[in-house]
Amino acid sequence: MKRRSWLGWLPVALSLSFVLIFLLSIGDDPDRAASPLVNKALASFSTEDFNQAADFGVPGRFSSRDFGHGRVGIINVFASWCPPCREEHPWLIDLARDGRAALYGLVYKDNPEAAHAYLTEAQNPFTALGLDAKGRVGLTLGVFGVPETLVVDGAGRLLYHHRGPLTGAVMREVIWPLLPPKVHSPRASPQ
């Protein structure tokens, strides 16, 4: 009888062991959980049309075909209802001003009018916007929620996937180093 009761707890003990191993593997920062898609070619996807993008003078859709043409691309997954998205927005403005990467905004499971109002208020940093109303593109890209940021190299390979808001530390330690070096034009010499 005692052996039988011990065997009943075996599945529970194994499940707890797997959870413990997972938590130890990511440490105390769940944002560090690596995406299995990193270092692989960007999965094929195409966003829905975000018609309101025309108000910002940018394309209202993008796809995996927009990447891999020699320029680094960054996909930021956001929603108007997401407070951490608002917190990270100044970093997106900085990325847009920096100009070393094309910045794509994926409006994730959001009302297009609300997303438009948010970008009008906060300023649109994106070179293209696409809608993912049902989360299908996010699923293809390994997205769990908002905000998330993906960095794609000039060959179309996913270099980095960050879950959670961008912070100064993430920008300094990860994002800026993944971008190509800044090219400074020489000053014109006086005649």
Image (spheres, rainbow, N blue to C red):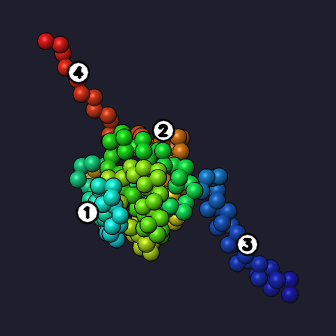
Residue 187's disc is: 4
Q: Amino acid at mark 4?
A: Arg
Which circle's residue, 1 or 2, is located before the other in the chain?
1
* SS of the residue under disc 4: loop
| Label 4, residues with CA under 10 Å away: few <14, some 14-19, many ≥20 | few
User: Badge 1: how crowded within 10 Å, few (<14), some, or many (20+)?
Assistant: few
Residue type, mark 3 in image: Ala
The dot on residue 124 is none
Query: Farthest bottom residue?
Result: 1
Secondary structure type for disc 2: helix
- Residue furthest toward the top? 191
Disc 2 to disc 3, C-alpha distance:
41 Å
- Measure the C-alpha gap from mark 4 to mark 1: 37 Å
Q: Earlier in the sequence, mark 2 or mark 4?
A: 2
Cα distance in 3D space between marks 1 and 3: 46 Å
Q: Residues within 10 Å of mark 3 (few under 14, many from 20)?
A: few
Nearer to the camera, 132 or 174? 132
98 or 70: nearer the eye?
A: 98
- Circle 2 Cα neighbour tier, 10 Å, few/some/many (<14 / 14–19 / ≥20): few
Can you tell which mark lies on residue 172? 2
Q: Mark 1 or mark 3: which is in front?
A: 1
| Comparing labels 4 and 3, the label whose residue is closer to the camera | 4
Residue type at the position of mark 1 = Arg
Give the quadrant of residue 60.
Answer: bottom left
Residue 177 x, y percent position in the rendering: 41, 39
Instruction: Please report the residue visible at 45 percent of the width from the left and 60 percent of the height from the top.
Output: 117
Give how far apart the Cα atoms at labels 2 and 4 are.
Answer: 28 Å
Which residue in the protein does label 1 denote?
Answer: 65
Q: Which residue is mark 3?
A: 13
The secondary structure type at the circle numbered 1 is helix
The local secondary structure at tag 3 comes to helix
**Vertical comparison of 11 with 46: above or below:** below
